[in-house]
Amino acid sequence: MYCLAVSSLNEIPWDELRAKARVAAAKSYAPYSHVHVGAAGYTSDGRVIEGSNVENASYGLTLCAECSLLGDLVRQGAGRIVAVAIVAGDGEPIAPCGRCRQLLFEHGGSELLVDAGASSPPTRLIELLPGAFGPDDLGPRSGS
Ligand code: THU
């Protein structure tokens, strides 16, 4: 797993990420839970990408906002994700679910910064997913 070079927290456009996550939350499809979630991520090549949760009548098929964001990251060939803001419909941060922590780890690694709101420092993903399993765990364990 390689690390991303973000030399300063000031390089991250947190206000823009929060604003875009709020817009994405307003576009979410959440007729079942009514929990509207939006996510906006800052990429290693300087783009901002967004995602919204997309629910389904078959509840277990729901896609989280982060899942939608990461689909776009890959589709755009935008590299890695460096920082992410995830908000609910009230505009405040919402914790990423366990599955999304794993998905974010794949594309952002342990140093990915997760917004905790304007008055708190961001959280490193490794604090949310300690002892994470990831791509580096596969090679040495395969074939044995
Ligand atoms: N949700 C997300 O979009 N991301 C998360 O990390 C937590 C949960 C969505 C899924 C579902 O549509 C709604 O929030 C309630 O669980």
Image (spheres, rainbow, N blue to C red):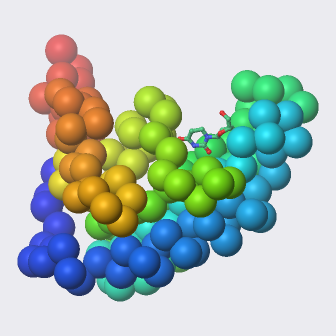
* Depth order, front residue of 67/86: 86
Q: Where is residue 111, by image quadrant?
A: bottom left
Residue shown at 32% from the left, 46% from the top: 105
Q: Is residue 97 left or right of residue 14?
A: right
Q: Is residue 30 left or right of residue 70?
A: right
Q: In the picture shown, does residue 4 fall above or below 128?
A: below
* Depth order, front residue of 85/79: 85
Q: In the picture shown, does residue 40 fall above or below 52?
A: below
Residue shown at 20% from the left, 30% from the top: 130
Q: In the picture shown, does residue 104 fall above or below 19?
A: above
* Depth order, front residue of 55/93: 93
- Report the residue that reaches farthest toward the front: 119
The image position of residue 62, as x and y in percent, is 73, 36
- Residue 81 shows in this picture: no
- Report the residue that reaches farthest toward the left: 7
The image position of residue 102, as x and y in percent, is 38, 37
For the image shown, how many numbered marks are present on the structure?
A: 0
Residue shown at 59% from the left, 59% from the top: 91
Q: Where is residue 22, by image quadrant?
A: bottom right
Q: Is residue 71 left or right of residue 34?
A: left
Which quadrant of the figure contains the C terminus? top left
- Residue 136 shows in this picture: yes
Residue shown at 79% from the left, 27% from the top: 59
The image position of residue 78, as x and y in percent, is 42, 76
- Report the residue that reaches farthest toward the top: 144
Q: Where is residue 15, by image quadrant?
A: bottom left
The image position of residue 33, as x and y in percent, is 78, 34
Quarter of the rendered image showing ligand 1: top right
Q: In the picture shown, does residue 27 fall above or below 60?
A: below
